Image: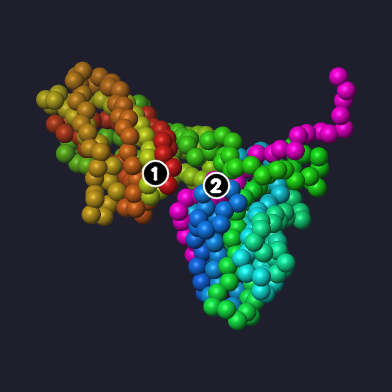
Amino acid sequence: MIQTTRKAVNYSDNIIDPYLAFNNAGSWTVPSGTGSAIHSEDFVFEGERALKIQNTDLANPITVSNSIQDTIISLKAGRCLLSFYMYRLSATDDYTGNVKIFVNGILIDTQAWALPTTENQEWHRFVSDIPYVLFLGDVVTFTFTFDATNGVGASETVFIDGMMLHDTNRLDGDGAVASYNKPQGNLFNIYTGWGNYADTLYTEGAPLTLVDGVEISLPNDALNSYELQKPLDVNTFYDGTVITGRDGDGVNITIELHCKPLGVGADPRLKTSIDIGGAVGKIYESEFSLSKGSGVEHYFLKSFDAYTLGTWEANGGTVKILSTNEDIAVYDIRYIITRTHKAR
């Protein structure tokens, strides 16, 4: 075989958020200026829709943004270029503007673009003039600005499509630009994951005593925790007081502990629930019978699927526990919380 001088194929995965393919119906906010920005079927470079930015006050620029976009970097590290295609209809007035690039909410660069009157009614590609060093878990977002033209019409419009963020390490140096390909999303799943939270205070030798008929919040100091496998966009599943929630998420919650009845009361039971406060209050209630006898250790395990909406996100979920028919000692308390679905 003959060795070539090319180090890599002219291809690199498009790791941008698939939402930025603009193929789903959607609209963008206009934090400054007058006009609108929607995912439009009028003119498309690839797919079903493109981002249509329409400025209706030609004496002032319009800037558009969107809180749904959320490109979370799945590379361990990369030197990434941003590119996109633009299209204009009118042959009057030169069009200029910029895209601002934010990483973890901090502006890192502003890239200008220009579409003169001679470049109307065809798609033109723009590529950032520098690569961006990005790391695993970085969150990249964008705003687009369409400058004032001081034109005489009622409005002027540009379309953006074929947006791409790709790692140049797969190509022949920083100057190489990969051919456009559809967004691949994250190359592995960074939205699911789990956390383990174990209490260190209450042990078999020094248990927590539940008084018959008195409901309390189940303590768990979580000083023995493991969070290396939690989703990158979740700060913690349990903050030492409440199980955190995100509006629209699905979770699996496992509560486990050891317990012993402290007397000979008939049919001693443990009842647990999650209290999210507000008008909802306690949910996911269940009971467990301790049938082995007084002073005999029982293993309590409760695992259930749940969903978290706005009330849970606002207040958190507090684990409640109640003993009935007897005082009960509990210890070795642990929670395992897994995200099974990320809110759309």
Tell me the tag on residue 47.
2
Question: Residue 67: x and y, percent?
Answer: 50, 57
Question: Residue 291: x and y, percent?
Answer: 18, 20
Question: Which region shows up in magenta?
Answer: 1-29
Number of numbered tags placed on the structure image: 2
Q: Position of 124 compared to 45: left or right?
A: right
Answer yes or no: is residue 189 visible.
yes
Name the residue: 37% across, 29% down: 332
Q: Image quarter for residue 125?
A: bottom right
State the separation of the CA atoms marked 2 and 1: 29 Å
Name the residue: 64% across, 48% down: 164
- Relative to 91, residue 262 above or below: above
Q: Image quarter for residue 252?
A: top left
Q: Is residue 30 magenta?
A: no
SS at circle 1: strand
Tell me the tag on residue 249.
1
Q: Amino acid at mark 1?
A: Asp
Question: Residue 289: x and y, percent?
Answer: 19, 25
- Relative to 44, residue 328 above or below: above
Q: Residues within 10 Å of mark 1 (few under 14, many from 20)?
A: some
Q: Position of 324 compared to 9: left or right?
A: left
Name the residue: 45% across, 53% down: 25
Q: Is residue 25 magenta?
A: yes
- Relative to 70, residue 192 above or below: above
Tell me the tag on residue 228.
none
Front residue of this view, candidates 217 and 230: 230
